[in-house]
Image (spheres, rainbow, N blue to C red):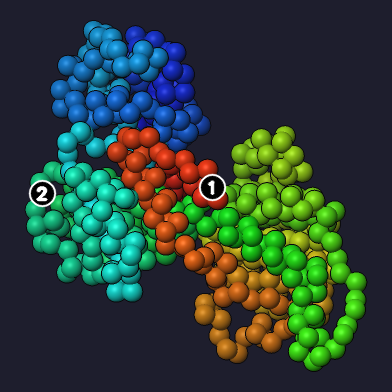
């Protein structure tokens, strides 16, 4: 479709800054009449590098495109006017507001200069008076208040009627801050929001709770999330669980409680093999820490091509395509199996009975992904029969874990109650990620902190994939 064609032009234009303006104009004009293979219609990885001044000018002059002097990135702000048609200019301008993705979602919708964005924050009573939301609404620490009109609410009645019903043509953005997903979906139905919604952001890394709402899942509005905010803590917890079992920490605690001076051999992580099923941001955080301890690391993901650089740099030893068949084969030679996948229809019960039964008797299963990705009955059976050595579970299929679950009483199970990423600065971390996205939304430079926070400047959720 035309969106895909235009986005192909965008991808070429922003990834090759030396391309002439005249050639860009000719390509954009051709996009209206010439088909582009569907395979080329993909999300532009370089969209965030569109020069800020061009992005702002494009949006500001969208109503009068023929007066827009085309900006050439290599000329440091100097303009070159190219005689071309209104439709050509509109095609070029649209590259800053549209992109091709499986769901056809738009990309970074940088607002016009001087236009205020209405930000609606959907939260809960627990968080409405939190330090983070106070800073968001009363200081310029997170976002420039002169560019945002911020409203916070726990229910749809908490938002002013004029904001939801009356159209002032200002762009609207939604921030889900640990509130009710249904409230966010209801907000999307309001006339002013429906017409002007430009961006939605989730303060969590997982978004399955939001995508259960059809109005959110089916919306063409870009949804970003807090990917990267909590990966470091999940990486640390995974290695901690390796050590918990490898050093027999639980047995030591029992001996201490019984006042028994028990001396027994302990294992070493160096030389052991860990398989990471779901080698994304969290998986990579596990790999970095495991490799530092001398472990052999094998990654598995839907698209292994995304990890070629990590294989070349020897951060991981191999990366395979994640399928049930390949997973079953690979677990047979691994000492630790880490599950770090999101929950999607494809990953439901990914860790099946067959896969558990093919693991080594000395191996340990670690779950920092989602409980629904595990056949929990099968896991309990292999743990009970000692077909695997143990399991470290930060997540379970049902949360809170029912009191009747056998997992509570198992000596070879380590439970952490979905707290592996619940750090002291949990809410500060996700607020920092939102701040980065605000900068990207405004077309401004994104601050790179250089610390444990490893979040993309604009992490667009693929609503069809679920992450």
Q: Residues within 10 Å of mark 2 (few under 14, many from 20)?
A: some
Q: Quadrant of residue 41?
A: top left
Please tell me which residue is depicted at 47% across the width and 33% down the height of the picture: 45
Tell whether label 1 touches label 2 (CB within 8 Å): no
Q: Judge depth for marks 2 and 1 and give the one in front.
A: 1
Q: Is residue 236 left or right of residue 106?
A: right
| Above-or-below relation of 6 to 301 | above
The residue indicated by pointer 2 is: 167
- The label shown at residue 338 is none
Rounded to the nearest angstrom, the CA distance separating label 2 from label 1 is: 42 Å
Indicate left or right for 178 with 401 as reference.
left
Q: Does residue 463 appear to the left or right of 414 in the view shown?
A: left
Q: Residue furthest bottom?
A: 258
Per the image, label 1 sits on a secondary structure element best described as loop
Check disc 1 and report the residue beneath it: 451
User: Mark 2: which secondary structure?
Assistant: loop
Quarter of the rendering occupied by the N terminus: top left
Residue placed at 47% from the left, 23% from the top? 15
Percent position of residue 106, x then y: 34, 39
Q: Nearer the viewer, residue 343 or 206?
A: 206
The picture places residue 420, in percent across and down from the top left corner, at 57, 67
The answer to which of marks 2 and 1 sits earlier in the sequence is 2
Regarding residue 181, the answer to whether it shows in the image is no
């Amino acid at each position: 479709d035309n969106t895909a064609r235009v986005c192909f032009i965008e991808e070429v234009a922003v990834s090759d800054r030396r391309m002439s303006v005249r050639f860009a104009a000719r390509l954009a004009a051709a996009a209206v009449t010439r088909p582009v293979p569907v395979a080329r219609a993909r999300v532009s990885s370089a969209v965030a590098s569109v020069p800020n001044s061009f992005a702002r000018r494009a949006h500001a002059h969208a109503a009068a495109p023929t007066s827009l002097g085309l900006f050439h990135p290599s000329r440091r702000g100097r303009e070159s006017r190219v005689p071309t048609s209104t439709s050509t200019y509109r095609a070029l301008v649209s590259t800053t507001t549209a992109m091709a993705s499986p769901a056809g979602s738009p990309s970074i919708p940088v607002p016009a200069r001087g236009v205020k964005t209405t930000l609606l924050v959907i939260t809960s009573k627990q968080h409405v008076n939190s330090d983070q939301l106070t800073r968001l609404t009363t200081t310029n620490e997170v976002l420039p208040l002169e560019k945002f009109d911020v409203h916070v609410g726990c229910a749809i009645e908490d938002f002013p009627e004029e904001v939801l019903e009356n159209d002032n043509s200002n762009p609207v953005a939604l921030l889900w801050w640990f509130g009710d997903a249904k409230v966010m979906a209801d907000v999307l139905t309001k006339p002013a929001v429906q017409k002007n919604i430009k961006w939605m952001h989730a303060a969590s890394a997982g978004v399955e709770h939001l995508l259960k709402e059809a109005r959110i899942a089916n919306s063409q509005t870009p949804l970003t999330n807090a990917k990267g905010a909590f990966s470091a803590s999940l990486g640390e917890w995974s290695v901690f669980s390796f050590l918990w079992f490898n050093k027999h920490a639980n047995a030591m605690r029992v001996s201490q409680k019984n006042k028994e001076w028990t001396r027994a051999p302990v294992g070493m992580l160096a030389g052991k093999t860990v398989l990471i099923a779901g080698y994304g941001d969290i998986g990579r955080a596990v790999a970095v820490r495991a490799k530092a301890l001398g472990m052999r690391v094998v990654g598995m993901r839907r698209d292994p091509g995304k990890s070629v650089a990590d294989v070349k740099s020897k951060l991981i030893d191999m990366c395979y395509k994640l399928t049930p068949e390949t997973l079953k084969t690979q677990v047979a030679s691994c000492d630790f199996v880490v599950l770090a996948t999101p929950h999607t229809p494809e990953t439901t019960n990914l860790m099946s009975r067959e896969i558990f039964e093919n693991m080594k008797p000395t191996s340990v299963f670690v779950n920092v992904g989602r409980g629904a990705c595990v056949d929990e009955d099968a896991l309990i059976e292999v743990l009970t029969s000692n077909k695997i050595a143990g399991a470290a579970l930060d997540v379970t299929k049902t949360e809170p874990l029912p009191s009747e679950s056998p997992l509570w009483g198992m000596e070879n199970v380590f439970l952490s109650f979905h707290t592996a990423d619940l750090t002291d600065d949990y809410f500060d971390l996700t607020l920092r990620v939102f701040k980065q996205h605000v900068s990207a939304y405004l077309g401004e430079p994104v601050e790179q902190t250089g610390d444990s926070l490893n979040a993309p400047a604009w992490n667009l959720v693929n609503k069809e994939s679920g992450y």
